[in-house]
Amino acid sequence: MRSMRPEVIEICLDNPDKVPGAKAVNGIVVLSVSGSEVTSRQIGDNDPFMSRLKMSGSLMWTEYNDHVCYIPSAALEPVKAKIDNCFIAGIVIGATEEESRGAARRLREEFSDVKKMVSSKPLCEFLMRSLYRKIRLPVLLFWLLVLVTNFIVSSHIGEELNVEQQLKRQSEAQYRNHHEIVTQKEKMIADYQGLILPKSSVEFDRIASLMPDGVRLYLMERTKEHAIKVSGSASDVSKILLYSELLKGISNTVEIKSLEARINDSNYYFDFLIRQ
């Protein structure tokens, strides 16, 4: 970090065209300003002058133990234009060259502290821009290629693992669904076989036997209109429509009384009315 220490540039406002030491290697500078335009004023305890000075937006100043030195901010604009490639870590105003030089060197040592440098957001941005300009483009391209290659390889491996896990979950889900469908169908057929009315039992068995995979029946009952009401659900609307077409082999009049989806439920619920 020693190479990042600020350089002190002495500015004499009597001759602002000459800016000695502006060729700072690391671009971080502390300006030591003196000259005839510098105003020096004695201050004491509870002196209201400092409050008025701090409220002014057109002056720059440096406060010492018993006095303050200040100049118009515009006096340094020509100097700043000549060192626009440097980062100004601080500006010290002195009544004499010796005074400003000594204060600037103390400020340089203070600003050389690593913690203070890291905490300065403008300085960090300046150093990053300087580093970017100095690093060779092939080095950046090399690391960019390494990052891209690593990302592609990692993504490919991750996609293969995800596909394998998804296939495994789908296979397990299909097995569970198939087992559940077979169980429900067997139970429903057994229940229908136990109905009291023989004629109804035969009709209900025929209706249940035409049920496609993926369709569940919850209710089959005779209505007052001498029709059979069939209620059930399926996760796919096409399964319900297929079931209605198959039921037309029993009766030409198969009405879909309702077909709806319910909130927070992925199934579709239907009511058929089969007229004799």
Image: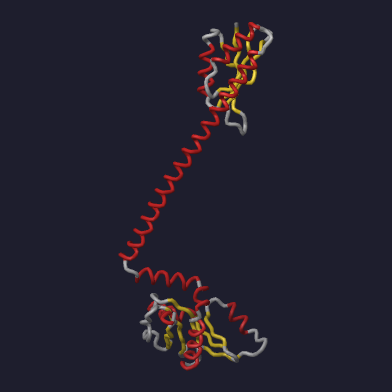
Q: Is residue 13 above or below residue 238?
A: below
Q: Could you say where residue 19 lies in the image, as x and y percent from the top left?
A: 38, 85
Which quarter of the rendering shows the C terminus?
Answer: top right
Q: Position of residue 64 (x, y in %)?
A: 57, 89
Q: Toward which corner of the image does residue 11 lie, by quadrant?
A: bottom left
Residue 16: percent from left, percent from top = 40, 85
The residue lying at 55 percent from left, 27 percent from top is: 179
User: How many marks overall?
Assistant: 0
Figure quadrant of residue 87: bottom left
Q: Residue at x 30, y 64 (%)?
A: 138
Residue nearer the viewer, 101 or 183: 183
Q: Quadrant of residue 240?
A: top right
In this rendered view, identify the residue nearer to me: 44 or 167: 167
Q: Is residue 15 left or right of residue 172?
A: left
Image position of 130 with respect to 219: above or below: below
Q: x and y percent of residue 208 in the render?
A: 58, 15
Task: Name the residue nearer the viewer: 31 or 246.
Answer: 246
Q: Residue at x 36, y 59 (%)?
A: 146
Give 144 or 29, whichever is nearer the viewer: 144
**Is the N terminus in the top left, top right, bottom left or bottom right quadrant?**
bottom left
| Colour style of the rendered protein structure | secondary structure
Q: What's the residue at 38%, 52% (across, down)? A: 153
The furthest residue to the left: 138
